[in-house]
Amino acid sequence: MSEKIEYTPFHPRWYRPHIPVFWWLRRRSYLLFVLRELSSVFVAWFVVFLLLLVNAVAQGPDDYRRFLDWSAGPGVLSLNVIALCFIVLHAVTWLFMLAPHAMVVRLRGKRLPAAVVGAGNLVAWVLASALVASLILG
Amino acid sequence: MEPFLWLLFSAGGVLSALLIPALLLLFGLAFPLGWVSPPDHAHLSAVLGQPVTRVVLLGLCVLALFHWAHRFRYTLYDGLQLKHLGRPINLFCYGAALAGSAVASYLLLAAW
């Protein structure tokens, strides 16, 4: 901090373009980007919801019944409707728009085209969902 | 550190995209709205009684939380232009993910 600051009569003006806080409302693609990023909030909410369910099941039938009643209340139900919309947005954009281009899958030394990776993801999604449903519904 | 966090983010993105839609559709909408009758307690308890179920759910919880932490951090950075608050934002995001992972481990492994 011992450097002497030399003042000159010429004052440099910073080039700082002003970006409004809500810059992402200006274009559909920007809005989609922010909505996709916000989907992570609902991913976190789902973890909370899942852990409450696990805890209720662990406590016994009465707590499980209470959890089911609580999840049918208007507040939790509407939150979950919104959450499901965001989760589906996340799943669709992640599995079919991002991953096919980001994942490099090679077969006999050749890179598989994005559409094939996307189709593989669709199969994986259907299988995972079917497994989850069959385990839960028994 | 950054590549490792990115790896957690991306693994969490895949796992939550594959598993959460079905789980949330059932427990968030289908059961509360009466579209499908919910499984009884004994059945769910048996499914969760399998160690493999709980390990998969723990993996989902931990990775999904770190997915949230990473993505939400950049949402705050870019969406609200808060990059100058980087340190508290990182503490909040990854701290919450760590705390949530600890709670998930307790509920799914220790307390079961």
Image (cartoon, rainbow, N blue to C red):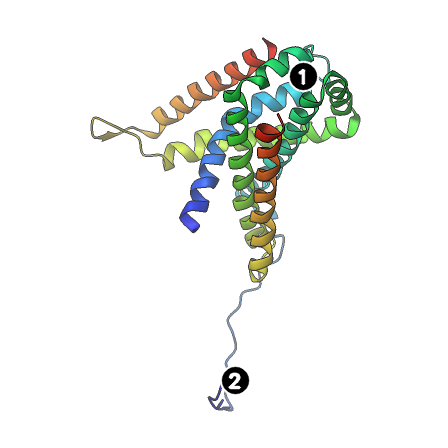
Q: Residue furthest left?
A: A109
Secondary structure at numbered mark 1 = helix
Residue B22 position (above or below residue B68): above
- Mark yes or no: residue B76 visible: yes
**Which numbered marker is on residue A135?**
none
Q: Nearer the viewer, residue A93 or A9?
A: A93
x, y (%) of residue A11?
52, 84
Q: Determine if residue A30 is in view.
A: no
The residue under label 2 is: A11
Which residue is painted at 58% across and 8% down in the image? A138
Residue B14 position within the rendered picture, expressed as x and y whole percent measured from the top left:
46, 31
Residue at mark 1: chain? B
- In terms of image quadrants, where is residue B38? top right
Packing grade of label 1 (10 A; few <14, some 14-19, many >=20) is some
Q: Which residue is mark 1?
A: B30
Chain letter, disc 2 residue: A
Q: Are marks 1 and 2 on the same chain?
A: no
The image quadrant that residue B50 belongs to is top right
The x, y position of residue B9, in whole percent, is: 48, 40
State the SS at label 2.
loop
Q: What residue is rendered at 50% in x and 87% in y?
A: A10
Q: Residue at x 57, y 34 (%)?
A: B105
Query: Hey, what amino acid is under mark 1?
Result: Ala
Tag 2: residue type? His
